[in-house]
Amino acid sequence: MATAPQSVPAVPSTAVPSSRTGVSAVTAVPAAGNAAALAHFAARLTFETDAADVAADLAAGVPGLVVIDSRSTESWEQGHIPGAVHLPTALIAARGDSVVPPGATVVTYCWGPGCNGATRAALEFARLGHPVKEMLGGFEYWAREGHPVQTARGVSRRPADALTAPVSGVSCAC
């Protein structure tokens, strides 16, 4: 004997922001207060960095920075940041302390914004007690911004993608 379909409880409607209703999509949920905003944005900067800042520090030879590529060997061979250390996430617990000097800051990267491999790698380094930041955009944005890429054939640069960086090659100076 078939049972009648159960009804789904009605979901209360909420105002859909639209220019026709006069409700703002941006301010429908108010911005955080100043103290909360200061804490949030300051905290984000303690956990994250970007390709342009990493490139600037590497070019300047800033000491105490270890850039870790947490991708597979095949990915590493396809191209990586010159000077980076290849250490797949699965090996960090066993080998992380041997590749990162005490007190050095680790920067992890993986493929790009659609991959959370750098986040997992950063977590592993944090578990080992190392100061660590994740590079936003990963290798994708490193290459798209026109930074140098190392392969077995040498170091090359792609033109900057106008959607990610000034094509003039000058820093965006954000």
Image (tube, rainbow, N blue to C red):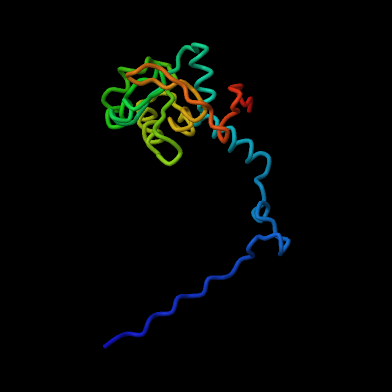
Question: Which quadrant of the view contains residue 99?
Answer: top left
Q: Residue furthest bottom?
A: 1
- The mark total stands at 0
- What residue lies at 26% left-to-right and 88% top-to-bottom? 1
Above or below residue 63? Residue 91 is: below
- What residue lies at 56% left-to-right and 70% top-to-bottom? 12
Where is residue 86? Give x, y as percent.
33, 23
- What residue lies at 65% left-to-right and 60% top-to-bottom? 17
Horizontal relation, residue 150 to residue 48: left or right: left
Horizontal relation, residue 28 to residue 69: left or right: right
- Please name whichever residue, 169 or 142, is drawn nearer the observer in this view of the structure: 169
- Please name whichever residue, 161 or 45, is drawn nearer the observer in this view of the structure: 161
Above or below residue 137? Residue 82 is: above
- What residue lies at 50% left-to-right and 27% top-to-bottom? 51
- Please name whichever residue, 111 or 148, is drawn nearer the observer in this view of the structure: 148
Above or below residue 5? Residue 56 is: above
Where is residue 133? Give x, y as percent.
46, 28
Where is residue 145? Give x, y as percent.
52, 28
Where is residue 23? Give x, y as percent.
70, 60
Where does the C terminus fall, quadrant-wise?
Answer: top right
Above or below residue 140? Residue 95 is: above
